[in-house]
Image (spheres, rainbow, N blue to C red):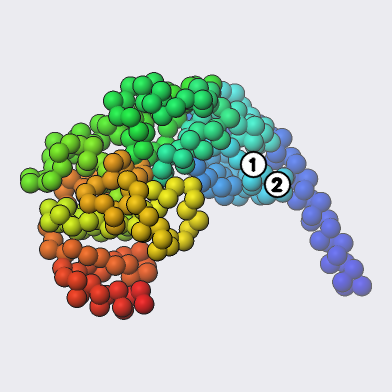
Amino acid sequence: MRIKRLAILAILLGLAGAGGLAWYGNQPLRIEPLPKTINVAPGTHLRSLSAMLEREGVIGNAQAFWLLGRVLGKAGTLKIGVYTLDRPLTPLELYAKIQRGDVSQAMVQFIEGWNWRDVRAMLAAQPMLKHDSAGMSNAELMQAIGAEESHPEGLLFPDTYFYAPHTSDIQVLRRAYRLQHEKLMAAWEVRSAGLPYRTPYEALIMASIVEKETGAAFERPQIAGVFLNRLRLGMRLQTDPTVIYGVGERFDGNLRKVDLQRDTPYNTYTRAGLPPTPIAMPSEAAIRAALNPARTDALYFVSRGDGTHVFSSNLAAHNRAVNRYQR
């Protein structure tokens, strides 16, 4: 009998909760002042959206808004972008607006370390962009964005770009190109003395290698220092990311001995000096590291397996580090 009473109580509480959520979902939100803009950024999930809306004064109770979304199955339907709220909405109407992607500004994000194929794939996945660049060759695209270079790799600044719906992807690319150029030239003006770069573009190539070699930000100047020491001595850079870039779409995640031996313009095991172009989009931090490297006598480094590296100034010490961490 007691179990039966508890079951009946649970059902009644559930019905009350459902009724309360239904009532809440249909009550106009007190959004002040209007209009108000909210930014649903990349990586936003249901709980962080609820907290942000409460913080911005759009909703009064983040927990209730989150629970409504969970009950309605909204967790996987949020579309990023900037939304303008120009009238009072109910929580259900607000969810519908974000689910539809009814944005005043959309956004696209380019991630540091991405290559040109990644960028093209991201642009193609943007339903609110006009895909004017889709049929263009690299040379045509470079001309369209006002670039003097012939190859687009590394020329875009990794960042989040907002755009109005139906904007041409050419405009987004032009902004990303100009911003990367500004960042590069600003860093070039305050570069260290005695660097072996003939042009800012060569520094950009080095920055892209530094970007791909380490995910530890504090190591970037030291990684750059090692590669610049090698350039000054006429040593080959022997960096795997350039080889992988040369392998291209055939790379399956496993770098083989035959790949290191196959000569391509990007194989820094078979060719001296820098590769002909960047191999990825370098971050501003990587650009600064390439132009203001650490002063070091190191010529080698090997991964510890935790994202950081051991640096050595001679081959014997390097081999000991390889034996310890790689073999």
**Residue beneath the point at 56% across and 47% down:** 45
Q: Residue at x 15, y 38 (%)?
A: 198
At x 44% / y 27%, what residue is drawn? 137
Q: Position of residue 313 (x, y in %)?
A: 15, 68
Residue at x 41%, y 23% (from the top left corner) = 140
- What residue is shown with label 2? 73
Residue type of the residue flagged with mark 1: Thr
Total marks placed: 2
Q: Is residue 278 left or right of residue 190?
A: right
- For mark 1, what is the residue? 77
- The quadrant of the picture occupied by the N terminus is bottom right
- Binning the other alpha carbons within 10 Å of mark 1 as few (below 14), some (14 to 19) or many (20 upward) gives some
Q: CA distance from mark 2 to mark 1?
A: 8 Å
Q: Amino acid at mark 2?
A: Gly
Where does residue 217 sit, x and y in percent of width and height? 29, 55
Q: Secondary structure at mark 1?
A: loop
Q: Nearer the viewer, residue 158 or 104?
A: 158
Q: Is residue 127 visible?
A: yes
- Location of the C terminus by quadrant is bottom left
